[in-house]
Image (spheres, helix red, strand yellow):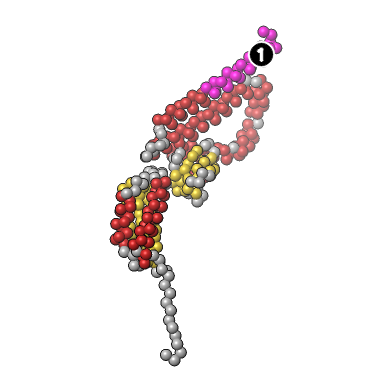
Amino acid sequence: MSAAWRLPLTKTLEIALTVTFALILIRFINVLEDYFYLKYDLNKENNLKERKIRTQLQFVRKFIVSLIILITAAIILLSFESMRKIGAGLLTGVGIGGIIIGFAAQKSLGNLLAGFQIAFTQPIRIDDVLIVEGEWGKVEEITLTYVVVNIWDQRRLILPITYFIEKPFQNWTRVSADLLGTVFLYLDYTIPIEPLRQEMTRLLSSNLLWDKRVNVVQVTDSTKDGSIEVRFLMSASNSSRAFDLRCNIREAMIAFIQTNYPESLPKKRLEFKDKLDGI
């Protein structure tokens, strides 16, 4: 084969082999990730360990894949003689260029370092339940630069990864998914509390959402408008169950009071005095 055909074909094959090898590495990493995803399934009742491992795996996989792509692109570019000359020329201005690149990449490097910090210190994990920017949702994805939070109504809240290093937020599943739920009812002073406790116990005992840890009824406050604040405290194994349990107990307790103690529902009291002249 003549040089006119052999040299371009050789260069094309060299680039194709480099790209193919990079793709094989990326596919191998994806296979390993799938293996660990099957081994550490999130569909368990107590999945704290699984969430920890998945968060680290997801970040490490994306970092390694990005590194492979950058190295592959660099190898391909440096295989051309013209690109080597450009690189040699750039090295002469590395002082000024380094400063410029440093300023330009400051934000990206900050995101990358924040990603490493989140992956290994883990203030958040995949499938964690968060209250962030006034929204309730679960961590759906952690990338090198941003975090996707799946909000309860299926919207997606996209936040920069540095947000979870610099700003406060609530993590309801940081140590455990177990939660306490509260229901507040405002009733008249005539309401008897002991029947409420008995009814609360009956309702929880027959409800599969209750995890049998906490069952408390307390009068926690008295308000200026002539009513008392009754708190019903209960527990559940995760935030979704706690929310549903609270709704169930609230509805059932209101129905119980309406049926058995309607006179104890909140009242507005008005007092009328007749004043007649000369009497």
Residue 241: x, y in percent?
39, 46
Which residue position is annotated with label 1?
A: 7
Residue 136: x, y in percent?
47, 48
The kind of secondary structure element at disc 1 is helix
> Position of 202 compared to 14: left or right?
left
Majority secondary structure of the magenta segment? helix
Residue 190: x, y in percent?
34, 67
37 or 164: nearer the viewer: 37
148 or 79: nearer the viewer: 148
> Position of 171 compared to 100: left or right?
left
Residue with the most extreme top position: 1
Query: The C terminus appears in which quarter of the rendering?
Result: bottom left
Residue 35 colored in magenta in the image: no
Residue 227 shows up from this direction: yes
The residue sitting at 54% across, 20% down in the picture is: 21
- In the displayed structure, 87 sits above or below 132; it is above
Q: Quadrant of residue 8?
A: top right
The amino acid pointed to by label 1 is Leu
Q: How many marks?
A: 1
109 or 226: nearer the viewer: 226
Residue 236: x, y in percent?
36, 47
The residue stretch that appears in magenta: 1-24
> 10 Å neighbourhood of mark 1: few (<14), some, or many (≥20)?
few
The residue sitting at 51% across, 25% down in the picture is: 27
Residue 11 colored in magenta in the image: yes
The residue sitting at 38% across, 43% down in the picture is: 176
Residue with the most extreme bottom position: 278
Residue 161 shows up from this direction: no
